[in-house]
């Protein structure tokens, strides 16, 4: 069994071609800008989208953490056991339970529906998260089952684990995509909750393994949107064999509503994507030492 948050079909940004992306729940980093905050905890959790609530009171009938006052639902998260009974009776979609145990067969049943699209587009299935490598046994079983069906496989990972965890999966992986968010160790620790020494070592070891890999940097306003930063990262990975390309991803503010729905502070609530010309200038700084830099 694996704990997943979602399976997204027809993804176009999680590897080559048309893909299905399987989102694992649980992450061992805490990037301040994470746009999938519902994937961070391993346990299931309730998301509450206030704007969708019609005040019907059905949730209050099944769980004491909900009550209706003056036509409005009041949700006391401190009383919530995250068992999701409320979400099952909420027909407006205001309440959602995020996190579900799934078998390999459950996932295969869903993703194999698009096998023809993968074949026609050069696509496949990508495991993402959260952090896939925190559920290595389930990931290994799923990747093996996908390969047996002839499906191209990829993983999106923070690589913040012992290399042996990734190494065990490499025979059934066709492509590894990983993030390198900051070059400076202290800044990396400050903004993501973890240092980057193990990540740098793992990228180098991945390169030595011969497996094709893509490195990506989410460009975050006020954090790493400097030429020196991108140039330092590009200088390191530009020398490594097996790099398919280095991609800069503009800041994505779309996770904001999920922070509200989880009652979690969003440090980057007012931040906006960088202008296209800034992204191109950063890419140019990286291209001086790594010819494959692109803006995603
Ligand atoms: S590594 Fe990815 S999933 Fe984990 S906190 Fe950072 S951005 Fe979010
Ligand atoms: S069941 Fe849904 S729509 Fe009804 S009060 Fe609860 S949250 Fe609001």
Image: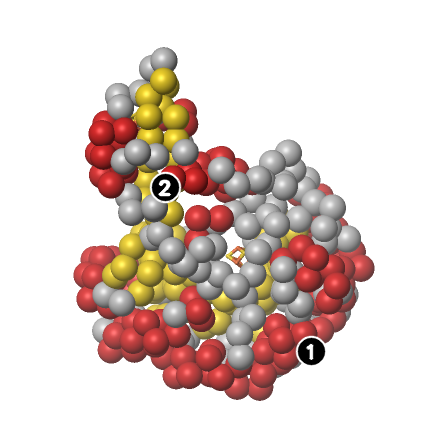
User: Counting residues from the N terminus, which is met first, the one under dot 1 or under dot 2?
Assistant: 2
Q: In which quarter of the image is ligand 2?
A: top left
Residue 119 position within the rendered picture, expressed as x and y whole percent measured from the top left: 29, 65
Q: Nearer the viewer, mark 1 or mark 2?
A: 2
Q: Do the residues labelled 1 and 2 touch (CB within 8 Å)?
A: no
| Above or below: residue 235 compared with residue 268 | below
At x 26% / y 21%, what residue is drawn? 56
User: What residue did someone put label 1 on?
Assistant: 239
Whether residue 204 is visible, yes or no, is yes
**Mark 1 to mark 2 CA distance (whole Å):** 50 Å
Closest to the observer: 110 or 66? 66
Q: For residue 247, which quarter of the picture?
A: bottom right
* Image position of 242 (left or right of 222): left
Closest to the observer: 180 or 125? 180
Q: Which colour scheme is used?
A: secondary structure
Under tag 2, what secondary structure? loop
At x 48% / y 49%, what residue is drawn? 36
The N terminus, quarter of image: bottom left
At x 33% / y 30%, what residue is drawn? 66
* Image position of 110 (left or right of 234): left
Closest to the observer: 53 or 238? 53
Total marks in image? 2
Q: Does the residue labelled 2 lie within 8 Å of ligand 2?
A: no
Label placed on residue 80: 2
Q: Residue furthest top?
A: 70
Q: Is mark 1 within 8 Å of ligand 1?
A: no
Closest to the observer: 28 or 278? 28
Under tag 1, what secondary structure? loop
| Above or below: residue 117 compared with residue 145 | above
Residue 71 position within the rendered picture, expressed as x and y whole percent measured from the top left: 34, 15
Q: For residue 31, which quarter of the picture?
A: bottom right
Residue 296 position within the rendered picture, expressed as x and y whole percent measured from the top left: 57, 53
């Amino acid at each position: 069994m694996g704990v997943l948050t979602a399976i997204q079909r027809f993804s176009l940004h999680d590897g080559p071609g048309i893909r299905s992306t399987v989102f694992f729940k649980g992450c061992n980093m805490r990037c301040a800008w994470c746009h999938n905050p519902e994937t961070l905890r391993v346990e299931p959790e309730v998301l509450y989208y206030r704007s969708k609530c019609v005040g019907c009171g059905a949730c209050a009938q099944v769980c004491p953490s909900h009550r209706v006052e003056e036509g409005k639902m009041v949700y006391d998260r401190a009383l919530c056991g995250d068992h999701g009974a409320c979400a099952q009776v909420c027909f407006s979609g205001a309440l959602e339970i995020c996190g579900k145990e799934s078998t390999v067969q459950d996932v295969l049943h869903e993703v194999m529906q698009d096998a023809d699209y993968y074949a026609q587009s050069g696509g496949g299935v990508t495991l993402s998260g959260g952090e896939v490598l925190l559920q290595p046994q389930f990931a290994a079983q799923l990747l093996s089952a996908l390969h047996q069906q002839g499906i191209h496989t990829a993983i999106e990972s923070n690589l913040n684990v012992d290399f042996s965890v990734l190494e065990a999966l490499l025979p059934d992986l066709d492509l590894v995509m990983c993030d390198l968010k900051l070059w400076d160790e202290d800044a990396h620790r400050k903004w993501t909750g973890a240092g980057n020494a193990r990540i740098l070592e793992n990228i180098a070891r991945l390169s030595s393994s011969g497996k094709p890999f893509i490195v990506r940097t989410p460009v975050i306003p006020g954090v790493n949107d400097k030429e020196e930063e991108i140039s330092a990262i590009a200088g390191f990975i530009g020398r490594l064999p097996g790099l398919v390309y280095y991609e800069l991803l503009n800041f994505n503010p779309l996770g904001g509503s999920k922070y509200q729905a989880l009652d979690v502070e969003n440090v980057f609530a007012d931040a906006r994507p960088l202008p296209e010309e800034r992204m191109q200038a950063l890419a140019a700084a990286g291209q001086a030492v790594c010819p494959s830099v692109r803006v995603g």
